Image (cartoon, rainbow, N blue to C red):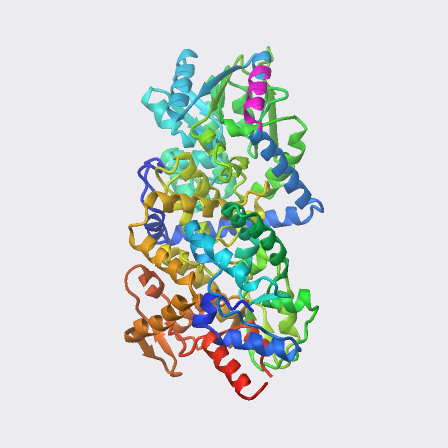
Amino acid sequence: MSGTALDPRTAPTFPMAAKTMMGDTQLRKNVRHATDVIQAKRARVVDEMPDWQELRESGKQIRQHTMEHLDFYLEEFESNCTKAGGVVHWAKDAEEARRIIVALVKAAGATEVIKIKSMTTEEIQLNSALEAAGIHPYETDLAELIIQLGHDQPSHIVVPALHKNRQQIREIFQREMNLPELGETPQDLADAARQFLREKFLRVTTGVSGANFLIAETGGVCIVESEGNGRMCLTLPETLITVAGIDKVVPRFEDLEVLLQLLPRSATGERMNPYNSIWTGVNPPDGPREFHVVLMDNARTEILGDAEGRQTLNCIRCGACQNACPVYRQTGGHAYGSVYAGPIGAILTPQLQEMHHAQSLPYASSLCGACYEVCPVKINIPEVLIHLRNKVVKQNGMLNAEALAMRAMGMIFRSESRFRAAQRMGRMAEAPLVRKDGRGEGWIGWLPGLLGGWTQVRDLQAMPEETFREWWEKRESKEVASGN
Amino acid sequence: MFITCYNDTLFPATGKAVVRVLERLGHTVEFPAGQTCCGQMHWNTGYQAEALPLLTRFVEQFRGAEAVVVPSSSCVAMMRDHYPKMAEEIGDVKLKAEVAELLPKVFEFSEFLTKRLGLEDVGAYYPHRVTYHASCHGLRNLGLGDGPQRLLRAVRGIDLVEIAGLEQCCGFGGTFAVKNAEVSSAMLAEKTNAILNTKAEACTACDNSCLMHIHGALHRQRTGIQTVHLAEILAGE
């Protein structure tokens, strides 16, 4: 993968990108292994919870309630955060968010920033904007560091370097940290990263973070993480800038009781995260002296306005749907052409693009429902996928081959006699393609046009000589004739 | 019985087997001739306007039935998960009420036997090594649980072997199989490998759609493994 950012506006369609990614044997092995491991860990810590389903329902209710009153809770957050000494900025889109952050970093007189892993900063491609302004961002999360040093792109919400294995990471560190003798044990790699990062933590005076939750009631911000790098970025810098989508707000402090049980178990299969940081404004003489929060819309209010798509915003970014998804398992994350990959990406990305791009993503699912089953806040992803497919169909109009075929099928199903005629015609139409196999059964090995995808690796059994209804009618008439 | 459009056209043997099993158990089967399709293909592919009239048609054909038995879990899932919303969309109060009344009477075939009739042994004989594929809609949307396996275990002569990765999708997904043929094929390869590992002679399921997909690959690879709908095993004597 090149250093080119994942951008849904320019990405190839999912089937095209998937084909390319699926040619990478190493990537497929890495993705299968990693998702198997995380899924097994998740299953262990979820199965031990007697009230998991009730927790999921509570999580859903909290998120749904928040979305229904988002304007209220955002203003409450702004007011409480301001009272505590934070400065709240509003950004209507990615461009405005980038502009605000770059200006804040410049105002702090900084030419470097340390960063906590944040999908929101990936969404708005903040790093390239910082670099263009002469500011060097250092990713401090181990996986994000691997991505940054490898000039790569994240392929998973929680485990962004999931597509890389240990040997590949070692090569990146050897090259980029100039450590030709580096070993390949996890200890070796962690030591190298620690040494590389420690110096940045102590030197750089501006931090940039995302947020897991914004607490309206207190004006506090919550970040959970596993490595402690986040804690460093939140406490050591003099200036801290947090950027968060407006969907990250929760009403009350005690809502975290539910969400902080759901999130770690779903995300990393841990009972709780090793590091849970919650901070409220500034607290001299401790921690950053200046604290800014950039609240970003970037199409979220558009999504909020769609009653059926709205539940997408309930997402707490645990990535469980990605690990469970049989499609993601085959392709990895980059095929989705967006930093949000997997099932949640397939519904979030097209909506963040206001349906102007990424129209192939709602079809990147067999609707198997594994995502819905594991979602900690019960987002019915298959339902939203179908809703978005309907939007795509409306966009495409009725004058393409698929739409015409679908319309014809609709006509056929609306009438018994047309249905019967279509069954007879189907048998005649397929006849030239049918070949007998060893058992004397008719099979089709090649289909034209749109249907050709089927016969790439599958045969299709020929239609039987008699439909069920023909058999039934013969049977009924025999029974009548015999006086039954 | 609602046979469903693709079973009627492509898998009449399944319909005959459902009739055989139900009649053997002493039930009377009716087949409303005007039935066609539940609307799943249109609905799931995004052609919702085309799907709506099929809901009306279904209600017209099956209103008044004591129970509607459907040998396809994905079609039943379509009806249970989406018909109430579709009726809402059509905006006909009477239709909405009829849908609410009819839906609790709609059963997937194995579900009708285990949940409605409370049966496990339906007096079947099938002397073959068989593995059961849990279709996603049966497993997740209908919550069939181990109902189908309990029916199979009660079949005399059967050698039922469990497949690895039972919860994994076979990659069919309706139009997904042609729109994302590459990914679908990769998912299917995992499934057929798991089937081959069981050394079964046949793979069964509650859905001929999955089986058509799986059989397509097993046949292309000349594995000699057959697929057979659950009803056809239960009809064996």
**Residue ranking furthest to the bottom:** A482
Q: Residue at the spot x=56%, y=52% of the render?
A: B95
- Residue drawn at (58%, 61%) of the image: B63
Say which of B98 and A365 sits in front: B98
Q: Is residue A307 above or below residue A425?
A: above
Image quadrant occupied by the C terminus of chain B: bottom right
Query: A100 or A238: which is nearer to us?
Result: A100
Which quarter shows the N terminus of chain B?
Answer: bottom right
* A243 left or right of A282 in image: left
Relative side of B79 to B172, left or right = right
Position of residue A432 measured from the top left corner of the image (x, y, whole percent)? 28, 75
Residue B197 x, y percent position in the rendering: 51, 70
**Residue at 44%, 33% in the rendered image:** A145
Q: Magenta stretch mostly in which secondary structure? A: helix
* Residue A273 rendering spot, x and y as whole percentages: 61, 35
| Residues shaded magenta | A69-80
